[in-house]
């Protein structure tokens, strides 16, 4: 995570520094939630487990809340306009009812949470994703949040590259688009 703020990091019991979910990882979870093809309880829980969300158990009653939240998250990825992105992320922060909370659960060093650790899974995911998007927007720039430029794809992504010039969700989409451009330039009657 770029910038002067280290709130996106925490110390582990072993003394190692690990990125906390409120940094870039929360933004990446946002994109992955938007891109999730199946939005049933098992798929959402698998995604949360992959992102190391504590107590990721999702029940059928949670699914509609996750779907609504996913639709709200998508607004932050729709435009490269800073004012629109700020408005979208501010609305997410209000909805997530974020407030700083210092925690030392599981024997870890003090680290920042935006909701109490006892909150339900949807509330914790809202805090992680809204906080992560806010950090990326403020410390890494809104251009880091995007939608794939390939015409057949519109997946959301967080640009984690060094230069911040990513325009496709994956290298595969970028390569496919490059091949299509190359073929269109070189197609036509041959002498």
Image: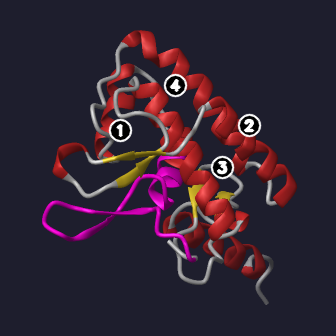
Q: Are marks 3 and 1 in contact (CB under 8 Å)?
A: no
- As for residue 12 lying within the magenta part, the answer is yes
Q: Residues within 10 Å of mark 3 (few under 14, many from 20)?
A: some
* Mark pair 4, 2: CA separation: 16 Å
164 is higher (above) or lower (below) than 117: below
* Mark pair 4, 1: CA separation: 11 Å
Q: Which residue is mark 4?
A: 66
Quarter of the image that includes the C terminus: bottom right
Q: Is residue 189 left or right of residue 108?
A: right
Magenta residues?
4-30
> In the drawing, what numbered circle is on residue 179?
none
Which of marks 3 and 2 precedes in the sequence?
2
Q: Which residue is mark 1?
A: 48
- Which label lies toward us, 2 or 3? 2
Picture coordinates of residue 5 (x, y %)? 53, 70
* Mark pair 1, 2: CA separation: 22 Å
Q: Residues within 10 Å of mark 1 (few under 14, many from 20)?
A: many
119 is higher (above) or lower (below) than 130: above
Which of marks 2 and 4 precedes in the sequence?
4
* Mark pair 2, 3: CA separation: 23 Å
- Residue 136 location, quadrant: bottom right
User: Which residue extends farthest top?
Assistant: 61
């Amino acid at each position: 995570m770029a910038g002067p703020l280290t709130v996106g990091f925490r110390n582990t019991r072993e003394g190692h520094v690990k990125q906390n979910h409120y940094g870039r990882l929360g933004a990446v979870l946002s994109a992955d939630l938007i891109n999730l093809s199946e939005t049933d309880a098992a798929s959402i829980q698998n995604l949360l487990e992959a992102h190391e969300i504590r107590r990721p158990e999702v029940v059928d009653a949670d699914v509609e809340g996750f779907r609504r939240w996913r639709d709200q998250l998508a607004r932050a990825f729709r435009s490269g306009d800073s004012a629109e992105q700020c408005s979208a992320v501010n609305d997410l922060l209000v909805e997530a009812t974020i407030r700083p909370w210092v925690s030392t659960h599981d024997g870890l060093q003090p680290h920042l949470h935006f909701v109490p650790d006892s909150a339900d899974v949807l509330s914790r995911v809202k805090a992680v994703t809204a906080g992560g998007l806010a950090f990326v927007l403020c410390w890494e720039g809104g251009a880091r949040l995007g939608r794939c430029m390939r015409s057949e794809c519109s997946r959301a992504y967080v640009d984690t590259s060094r230069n911040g010039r990513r325009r496709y969700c994956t290298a595969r989409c970028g390569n496919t688009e490059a091949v299509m451009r190359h073929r269109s330039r070189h197609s036509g009657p041959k002498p």
